């Protein structure tokens, strides 16, 4: 079954990419032909302008001039099959090239010329399905008495020597501007691959193409055989090496857990040292400042009393006090952790990682760590190591609070926030410490440093969230509330 599913997925992937390639090729070929047809259509405007100028200058008397130019145009542009000057009056002479126009076509030319207000008019040739009329009144004013018409072969307008359009699966259609009447071709598929009017102001004919993609186009016999052979070979190799890979993966997983535990422990020690250094700097700053002020005052008095020895001693005191202040300042800067850039990280992965890291600790104490996670993954913007460190500290505190504790890590969604609770069945936090539990150096254990929860609070606040100790609950519960990420998690 696994082999069959793999073959189906592989064939489906090949078919999908082959279809994408065919559609992409259709789009490129269609855009090229559309651009060529648009350029050809724009040439008709120039031809009409020059022919109209010749007719206005020479009139019917010099129709030879017009016919000579018309013959040259038709020779170099064979898609223009006829050039005609049709008078509005029935008994006035007309000028036309071979084969000329039918009575219905002449009436259509007059109708289009009378309708024109200066712009070129386009219409169908009644007795030539693949052709259309392009009409200009001449002269181009309300005093016009003639219509100048080009009969254009629409099929030649979109003619190309690209073999792509010779394939039975490829089709194109050129329709009137309203899209109601097809001048050339038919679309073989209801799903057009390309549809766009020509880029000509006077002839915005609708150009459409499509590609009837069949199964044989997507999956030729040779491709199917190759895919089945490749999948079979990979499947056999995978089955042969499964046990070895499983052992390797298990070893890598254990190494990863060990590395995570070491990294979390190191991060805890470094951050704890930073908190301690900051606290010491805060406590020692005031006496050092006092020593500095007294030494400066003594130096001033010594100078006034001209006591060189006292002045020298006080100068040394000022220098040493300043040096001590500089050392503490450097210590404070060094102890401030350099936070890694935030990234999209999973709350559930952090909880599962902490459960794995502390599994042995819980087993030693006869305790249990249970996960009760939200149905959907929850992601936040933070440093994954810092998030794991916070959850790690909370769970470790719960395990160290009592033996045989039952610790539960649960998650849920609260509006725009992801909420993570760490609850335990231990003795709880003493009442006199609840209001100060997040202050540095405040602890309820004789061997505690009082820095763990203070560190957790600072890290959570830097993530844009908050941490609280819930009051009035049956179990001791610390709650983390963190804003959910708006970004997409990396695969």
Image: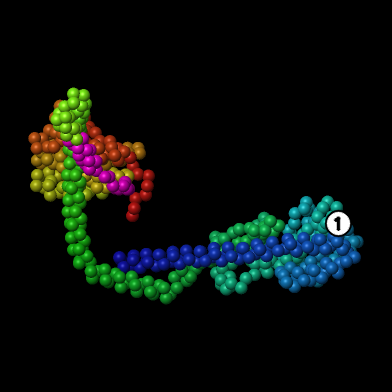
* Residue situated in front as seen by the camera: 252 or 311: 311
**Mark 1 — residue?**
145
Residue ID at (47%, 71%): 216
* Residue situated in front as seen by the camera: 224 or 249: 249
Residue 94 visible at all: yes
Task: Write down the region rendered in magenta.
Answer: 320-348
Relative vertical location of residue 347 with respect to residue 13 in this rendering, above or below: above
User: Residue 9, located in which quarter of the rendered image?
Assistant: bottom left
Relative vertical location of residue 306 with respect to residue 26 in this rendering, above or below: above
* Residue situated in front as seen by the camera: 70 or 262: 262
Residue ID at (85%, 60%): 56
Place of residue 354 in the rendered image (x, y in percent of width and height, measured from the top left): 20, 47
Query: Does the magenta-highlighted stretch encompass residue 324?
Result: yes
Q: Is residue 443 left or right of residue 7?
A: left
Place of residue 276 in the rendered image (x, y in percent of width and height, measured from the top left): 17, 38
Residue ID at (20%, 57%): 253
Place of residue 287 in the rendered image (x, y in percent of width and height, measured from the top left): 17, 29
Residue ID at (12%, 49%): 360
Residue 287 visible at all: no
* Quadrant location of the C terminus in the rendered image: bottom left
Query: Does the magenta-highlighted stretch encompass residue 29?
Result: no
Q: How is the image coloured?
A: rainbow
SS category of the residue bearing label 1: loop
How packed mark 1 is, by other alpha carbons closer than 10 Å (few <14, some 14-19, many 20 or more), is: some
* Quadrant location of the N terminus in the rendered image: bottom left
């Amino acid at each position: 079954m696994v082999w069959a599913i793999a073959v189906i997925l592989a064939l489906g992937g090949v078919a999908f990419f082959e279809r994408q390639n065919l559609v992409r090729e259709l789009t490129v070929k269609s855009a090229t032909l559309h651009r060529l047809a648009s350029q050809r259509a724009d040439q008709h405007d120039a031809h009409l302008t020059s022919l109209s100028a010749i007719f206005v200058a020479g009139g019917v008397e010099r129709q030879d001039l017009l016919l000579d130019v018309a013959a040259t145009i038709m020779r170099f542009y064979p898609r223009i099959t006829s050039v005609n000057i049709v008078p509005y009056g029935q008994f006035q002479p007309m000028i036309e090239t071979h084969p000329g126009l039918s009575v219905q076509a002449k009436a259509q030319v007059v109708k289009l010329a009378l309708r024109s207000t200066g712009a070129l008019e386009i219409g169908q040739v009644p007795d030539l399905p693949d052709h259309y009329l392009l009409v200009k009144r001449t002269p181009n004013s309300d005093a016009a008495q003639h219509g100048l018409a080009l009969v254009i072969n629409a099929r030649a307008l979109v003619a190309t020597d690209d073999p792509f359009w010779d394939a039975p699966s490829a089709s194109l259609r050129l329709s009137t501007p309203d899209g109601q009447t097809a001048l050339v071709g038919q679309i073989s598929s209801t799903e057009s691959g390309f549809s766009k009017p020509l880029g000509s102001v006077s002839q915005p004919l609708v150009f459409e193409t499509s590609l009837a993609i069949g199964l044989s186009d997507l999956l030729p016999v040779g491709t199917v055989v190759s895919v089945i052979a490749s999948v079979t070979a990979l499947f056999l190799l995978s089955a042969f090496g499964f046990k070895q890979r499983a052992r390797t993966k298990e070893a890598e997983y254990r190494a990863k857990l060990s590395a995570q535990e070491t990294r979390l422990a190191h991060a805890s020690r470094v951050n704890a040292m930073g908190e301690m250094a900051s606290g010491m700097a805060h406590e020692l700053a005031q006496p050092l400042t006092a020593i500095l002020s007294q030494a400066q005052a003594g130096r001033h008095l010594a100078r006034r009393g001209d006591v060189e020895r006292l002045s020298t001693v006080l100068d040394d005191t000022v220098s040493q006090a300043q040096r001590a202040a500089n050392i503490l300042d450097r210590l404070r800067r060094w102890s401030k952790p350099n936070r890694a850039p935030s990234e999209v990280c999973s709350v559930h992965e952090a909880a599962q990682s902490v459960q794995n890291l502390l599994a042995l600790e819980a087993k030693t104490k006869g305790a249990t760590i249970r996960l009760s996670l939200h149905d959907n993954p929850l992601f936040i913007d933070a440093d994954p190591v810092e998030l794991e460190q916070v959850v790690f500290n909370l769970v470790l505190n719960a395990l160290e609070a009592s033996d045989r504790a039952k610790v539960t890590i649960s998650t849920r969604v609260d509006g725009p926030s992801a909420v993570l609770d760490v609850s335990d069945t231990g003795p709880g936090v003493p009442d006199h410490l609840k209001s100060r539990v997040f202050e540095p150096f405040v602890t309820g254990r004789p061997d505690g440093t009082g820095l763990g929860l203070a560190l957790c609070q600072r890290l959570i606040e830097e993530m844009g969230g908050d941490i609280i100790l819930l009051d009035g609950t049956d179990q001791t519960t610390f709650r983390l509330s963190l804003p959910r990420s708006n970004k997409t998690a990396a695969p």
